[in-house]
Amino acid sequence: MFDIKGLFSGGKELAGLDIGSSRIKLAEIQDSPKGRILSLFSHAPLDKGVIVDGAVVEPETLTATIKELFKQSGCKRKKIVTSISGHAVIVKKATFAQMDEEELRALIHDEAGKYLPFDDMSAVDYDFQILGENPYNPSQMEVLIVAAKKDIIEGYTEAIQAAGLVPVIMDVDSFALETMYEENYEFDENDVVVLINIGASITNLNALKGGVSIFTRDFTLGSNSVTETLAANLGVSFEEAEKAKIEGRGNDEQARKTFREGLIVHADPICSEIERSVDYFRSTFSAETISKVLVSGGGALIPDLAADLGHRLGIETEVADPFKKIQLDKKVLSPGLTEGIGPIAAVVVGLALRKIGDK
């Protein structure tokens, strides 16, 4: 499942299924003579505790939620692209002498412990992708190695299979964001952008140069932490605080402004961790200048969060639009709804775009 076909390539007639810790999203994208069209999009809440730290804890509940989502959406596709993130997956860039793919596979198999932080490699599935020549040494090449524990992967695949579906691809959230970006945004080979997805419990960061990942980081802090702090301060339930977080609170403009300012204060731990990650990237890749930051995920819906991040980082920052170049079937999603839906759809759009033989 976690081989080169599974991780870095796709299949035909696939549906993207993004399984987050608080919500699952489903999407289909079709090719047409006029371009790509979002032909199906649906989402549903997932009970708290079903997914914890990137692992499936309550598979029966996950299976039931997936079944209901497919039933309500009318999705007929059975082959699924899904993804993992956080501590469930390790992404590492390494440099090797120039060799063909078969030789490299044998070398990584024999010496995997040198590159991956696992004691028992028999419990791990891993894969790689050759990124290209090392810019400083033509006799070497850059390789991206990705690994995850088999029990984590099996937790997702078994829950999906129990719903009567076939998991064809196990992707990584950060790479799904990359796919979404490549489809929707113009860039040249020297453009450096940072894609940030603030989920409910995990934040993904992927720095790209010329559309290719050069740095990734996940950390287990997301928008649920803002909701929990808000609920404690207001003395309301988590669900009520979640609604207030997105819709705002107050009967007049000044009250809403004060409330939004309070939300940004509550989001400070997330923004500070993002800032530290970007600072680390800048220190490690000192020759690279970030031109833009794109923010997605439910956390991107927090009012003024993108603006606050942009101020902190000193970089143009905006909310990602996964439908920028993808046409919308008005029966599926009204153009007027994309502003509220777009941020949470970034990963699932990337998953739904996967094709056979892509890289």
Image: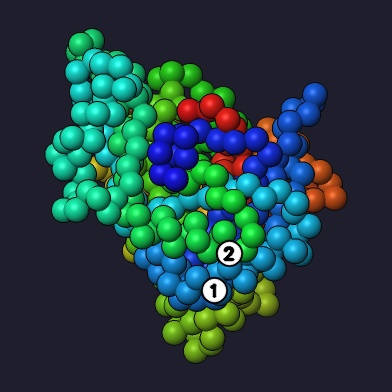
Kind of residue sitting beneath label 1: Glu
Q: Which residue is mark 2?
A: 162
Q: Nearer the viewer, residue 88 or 67?
A: 67
Q: Could you tell me residue 101's position as x and y percent?
A: 33, 21
Q: Nearer the viewer, residue 253 or 60?
A: 60
Pointer 1: residues within 10 angstroms few (<14), some, or many (20+)? some
Residues tagged 2 and 1 counted as in contact (Cβ below 8 A): yes
Pointer 2: residues within 10 angstroms few (<14), some, or many (20+)? some
Which tag, 2 or 1, sits closer to the chain's start?
Answer: 1
Q: Could you tell me residue 147's position as x and y percent?
A: 32, 45
Above or below for 208 versus 118: above
At x 33%, y 46%, the residue is 125
Q: Which residue is mark 1?
A: 60
Horizontal side, residue 80 vs residue 198: left or right: right
Q: How is the image coloured?
A: rainbow
At x 16%, y 43%, the residue is 113
Above or below for 141 versus 14: above
Q: Could you tell me residue 86's position as x and y percent?
A: 36, 56
Q: Which mark is residue 352?
A: none
Q: Quadrant of residue 278?
A: top left
| Secondary structure state at the residue bearing disc 1 | helix
Q: Could you tell me residue 142's position as x and y percent?
A: 28, 24
